[in-house]
Image (cartoon, rainbow, N blue to C red):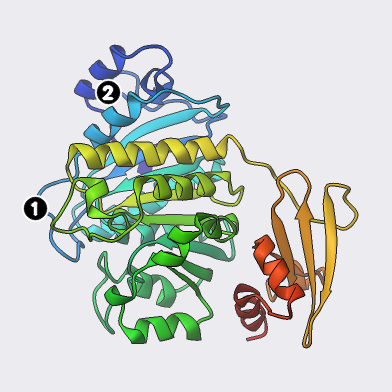
Amino acid sequence: MAFDFLVPIKDKVLAFSELLPPQALGKNIFKHTEKKGLPVFANATVAIFGVLESRNAFEKKPEQLDVDEIRIQLYRLMTGNWNSTILDIGDVEEGNTVEDTYFVVKEIVAGLLEENIIPIVIGATQDITFPTYRAFDKIRNMVNLVSIDSRFDFGEDEELISSNSYMSRIITDKPNNLFNFSNIGYQSYFNAQEEIDLMERLFFDAYRLGDVAANISLAEPILRSSHIVSLDLRAIRASEMGMSKNFSPNGFTGREICAIARYAGISDKVSLFGIYEGENSHQAFQMVAQIIWYFIEGISFRVKEFPSSKSEDFTKFTVPTDTEELIFYKSHVTERWWVEVPSILPEHTKTNSVALLPCTEEDYLDACNQKIPERWFKAYRKGFN
């Protein structure tokens, strides 16, 4: 069983948690220990585990990621007003081959998903996104993936999978269960024009760093329809991470990335949150801990909503445009917006229903001004290909 490969939390971390006040997270997380084994999975909300595999790093890592220091910084944070049951199930160490590690990660994630537990994966390199994606093979027919990254990570043709090319493997690997890929925070000078053109041809969504930083709420509808969120910590500016060599002077601030993590937690579709490409510095450890804290905070505010004109919780807006008639819904509970889009997904075609695409109020106002939202247009084109 894959869970047998998980290494228990080290004694130094357990000793540290014993000294914490009762309100600290470290006192309220159920831990995988050498003495007691794995915690009980029943009724758990999230499960945190580290993946120490780094052999497919695009630039070789000089040292192993210290997940224990991330744990210490996380454990010392105070719990919010949450109803979440949090597990820390230890670490996956390097297997005999990278593919061995991928297999174990895939099986662990699949096992957690089957228990309706949200995995929080702390990985040394972002190629770990690939086995977490493959874990959905028997869980969902089609998957939406959001990457918070300064790069698209497509790589070159025939390039072996690495932390800079894992998306090419996801797109081409069979079975292809990827329905949509969205990037939040790309920086143009890190991406070849061919990659930007490929995003357009595949009708994927890409949002530049400047646009999202100027209006952080743009990230919310993107994350609302996502099942997997993969965060490359190099999307955060170097000064925020206490790093200089492998991090850029431009990127998200700590406040912005924590807001994005909270949006990811609020989405009732997000089933996995991965945090990758961290390096060893006290400031970076704190940043990762706070990102995890805000993600769990978001989970506590989840509201399951399904827009319908028959529900008193929603208002339906019909907007005629020159080419299409767009149907929008606004929730009175959360004030979130959706727009109807024709779909080719089996669950919609069998019932002759439409898909509901999360959107913003600005999308509705644009439609009122005869400007069809770009995300709607891409989803529409994808539905008829």
Disc 1 marks which amino acid?
Answer: Pro
For the residues carrying marks 1 and 2, which lies nearer the camera in this image? Answer: 1
Disc 2 marks which amino acid?
Answer: Glu
Q: CA distance from mark 1 to mark 2?
A: 29 Å
Establish if 316 lies above or below 256. Answer: below
Residue 87, image x and y in percent? 43, 30
Classify residue 46 as left or right of residue 323. Answer: left
Quarter of the image with the C terminus is: bottom right
Residue 356, image x and y in percent? 72, 64
- The earlier-in-sequence mark between 1 and 2 is 2
Q: Residue at 36% of width from left, 75% of height from top?
A: 168
Q: How many marks?
A: 2
Residue 218, image x and y in percent? 54, 60
Number of other residues with Cα within 10 Å of mark 2, as a class: few under 14, some 14 to 19, many 20 or more:
few
The answer to whether residue 170 is seen in the rendering is yes
Q: Residue at 50% of width from left, 55% of height from top?
A: 216
Mark 2 element type:
loop
Residue 34 is marked as: 2
Of residue 296 and residue 7, the one placed in the foreground of this image is 296
Classify residue 354 as left or right of residue 253. Answer: right
Quarter of the image with the N terminus is: top left
* Residue that badge 1 annotates: 62
Number of other residues with Cα within 10 Å of mark 1, as a class: few under 14, some 14 to 19, many 20 or more:
few
Q: Residue at 45% of width from left, 74% of height from top?
A: 174
Residue 98 is marked as: none
Classify residue 375 as left or right of residue 87. Answer: right
Establish if 189 lies above or below 338. Answer: below
Of residue 352 and residue 225, the one placed in the foreground of this image is 225
Mark 1 element type:
loop
Residue 109, image x and y in percent? 43, 48
